[in-house]
Image: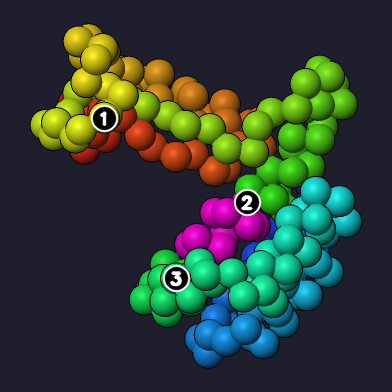
Amino acid sequence: MTIVRHIADASTKQASRMLVELLDRISEERLMQMLELAKKLTRNEDVLEALGGIQGFLSSNHPSKDIFYRVLDKIPKKNRFKIYDSLFNNAWFVGGPQRDAFEGEHGVRPPFIIILSPTYRCNLRCKGCYTLGYGLKPELDYAVIRRLLSECMDLGIYFVTILGGEPLAWSG
């Protein structure tokens, strides 16, 4: 990593911390300030469009807006930074240019998010669950999961949803 890139990454991290600090006093005004600051961190049109969409949602009377604020209010401060760092900083600001570079070289854009199911095993029997009908109990080896996550980072995919079966039933 070049020294310029290292400084840019450190600056982005610091700006991210400043944005998260604004979450201490959760309000629509504070979130709008955060979104305006976030817009200054990127030139990526997709990110700018998404940030504009979030601003539109927050300025609307959408019924889920109240749920959004209640959830945000209950998340501990340290976890707010982790969520911001994973979803926005890594997935958009760091991963976006990586996905752009891959697309430029190979003509195919890596996805923003992947879903990883390390196992279909589950100790629950939820009605309508898609894993109940498989009858198989395949599991991914730890080495395969580690390789997949490493490849995701190389491709600029920093948002990984872990599903299953039940991920906690995975024997690894």
Q: Secondary structure at mark 2?
A: helix
Ranked by sequence position, the earlier of labels 1 and 3 is 3
The alpha-carbon separation of the residues under discs 1 and 2 comes to 34 Å
The alpha-carbon separation of the residues under discs 3 and 2 comes to 25 Å
The alpha-carbon separation of the residues under discs 1 and 3 comes to 26 Å
Query: Which residue is rendered at x = 74% and y = 56% of the image?
Result: 50
Q: Which residue is mark 1?
A: 128
- CA neighbours of label 2 inside 10 A, class few (<14), some (14 to 19), many (20+): some
Type of the residue with mark 2? Asn
- CA neighbours of label 3 inside 10 A, class few (<14), some (14 to 19), many (20+): few
Q: Is residue 96 visible?
A: yes
Query: Which residue is rendered at x = 83% and y = 69% of the image?
Result: 40
Residue 79 placement, left or right of 119: right
Taking the view exactly as shown, the residue that stands out farthest to the left is 123
Using the image as rendered, state which of residue 114 and residue 134 is in the foreground: 134
Using the image as rendered, state which of residue 72 and residue 39 is in the foreground: 72
Any mark on residue 67, and which? 3
Q: Which residue is mark 2?
A: 90
- CA neighbours of label 1 inside 10 A, class few (<14), some (14 to 19), many (20+): few
Q: Is residue 7 visible?
A: no
Query: Which residue is rendered at x = 52% and y = 70% of the image?
Result: 63
Please state the horizontal and vertical placement of residue 95, each as a whole percent of the image: 69, 43
Please state the horizontal and vertical placement of residue 66, each as a whole percent of the image: 48, 76
Asked if the stretch drawn in magenta spans residue 82, the answer is yes
Asked if the stretch drawn in magenta spans residue 131, the answer is no
Using the image as rendered, state which of residue 9 and residue 141 is in the foreground: 141
Please state the horizontal and vertical placement of residue 27, each as a whole percent of the image: 57, 86
Please state the horizontal and vertical placement of residue 165, each as a whole percent of the image: 26, 28
Residue 25 placement, left or right of 139: right
